[in-house]
Image (spheres, rainbow, N blue to C red):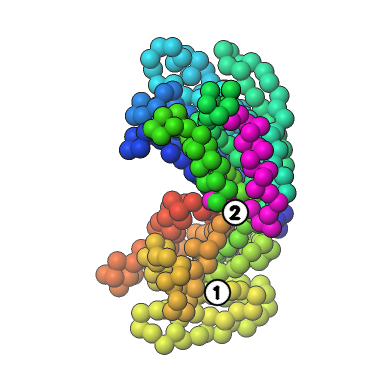
Amino acid sequence: MAEQIYIHTDVFAAQSSKKTGDPCGDAYGVFRDHTATTIVLSDGLGSGIKAHIAATMCVSRLLQLIREGMSLREAFAAMTRTMDQAWGTGAPFAVFAIARMLNNGHTTVLTYEMPMPMLVTNTYAQLLRDRVYTQNKAIIHESTCMVGKGEGLMLFSDGITQAGVGKFFPLGWESEGVRRYTQSLLPVDRLQGTQLAQSIHDKARQYWPLGKGDDCSVIFALNRRGVIVNLLSGPPVNKIDDSKWVQSFLDSEGIHIVCGGTSAKLVAQQNHMPLNVIDSGSMITPPAYELEGMEVVTEGVVTLNQVYHLLDDDPTSLNQQTPVTEVAWYLKMADRINIWHGLAENTGDDHIEFRQQGLQNRKKILKKITQKLMAQGKLVVSQSA
């Protein structure tokens, strides 16, 4: 399953509410799938709790529509219809921007009454040209661009662009003012997402009187080459698929981990390489294997259960080198995890001794590992056979 270089999108945010202690009337959310990272920034009408609820509802619905399979434009159109109906009725109302950044860097941004998006590289900042059209009552702006490795897309609420209105600037800081300020911070050897987003946010906040103005949000999506980990556990149901199954795993870009003795034997046969057992010397840590071309090769079910319990730990705390900590460290460091889950029955998975120790079978523990990694913002792509 060889593919082009995976570009990973890190998302950095700097936000503050109009009044200290109040909830922010802006909200944002991120959804990753195997093709893209989708980012939504929403600005609720007014400020405080009502604005926060409106913005949060907008973000949640948009991302849910994307999760359910709607295209970017279909989800965007559905939400604009909702907001058109809500406008002026007292129902929760919010404006919003949605960006879809494909894993190859191609990016589309749709905005509904929001400031212009900005492309930022290590040498220049550029407001994106857009196509303007109407959709029902809404005026829509659509922009497209390529965001390469080391480059980023910036979205901001109008609390940023309207900062200083009537005091420092006749019409506020405006998008061009934000662009000029961003340009003044360049060139740099490498963009620092947290620092850049916070710097722009703080500059805008300086233009607002204390406790007045508007909620302020800066969202910066920065692309880089992603770290891919491939994890194979279990042979396929049909032995006829063994060769194709293993070869797809071997051909995949990134780090390769095998969990399971039978799986390790399959990979060794496919590679025509010897498989050597390494005794961990521990009654707790299961043994590992040595196989050329693989970063880690371990026992299956016990290892996966122990790895699951380490995934909440700080990676720097995994300083004791064992097969389990190595697998956990790689998963924690990865941006994308490809899981090859073989569905061949293994009666040993449900052995009474495993259940007595609270060990879950391969199917259950891989599902829990996947859920935990996704909750940590990882992209997990699973395939089974």
Residue 323 pos. (x, y %): 47, 76
Q: Nearer the viewer, residue 357 or 210?
A: 210
Q: From what the image shows, is residue 70 above or below residue 376?
A: above
Residue 44 pos. (x, y %): 44, 26
Residue 292 pos. (x, y %): 64, 79
- The kind of residue on which mark 1 rests is Val
Q: Which mark is residue 192?
A: 2
Q: Nearer the viewer, residue 327 or 22?
A: 22
Q: From what the image shows, is residue 304 above or below residue 335?
A: below
Secondary structure category for the residue under label 2 = loop
Q: Is residue 185 magenta?
A: yes
Q: Residue at x 59, y 74 (%)?
A: 295
Q: Residue at x 49, y 38 (%)?
A: 206
Residue range corresponding to the magenta coloring: 173-194
Q: Are marks 2 and 1 in contact (CB under 8 Å)?
A: no
- In which image quadrant can residue 372 be found? bottom left
Q: Which mark is residue 296?
A: 1
Secondary structure category for the residue under label 1 = strand
Whether residue 162 is visible to the viewer of this picture, yes or no, is: no
Q: Is residue 26 left or right of residue 238?
A: left
Which of the two marks, 2 or 1, is nearer to us in this view?
Answer: 2
Q: Residue at x 53, y 33 (%)?
A: 160
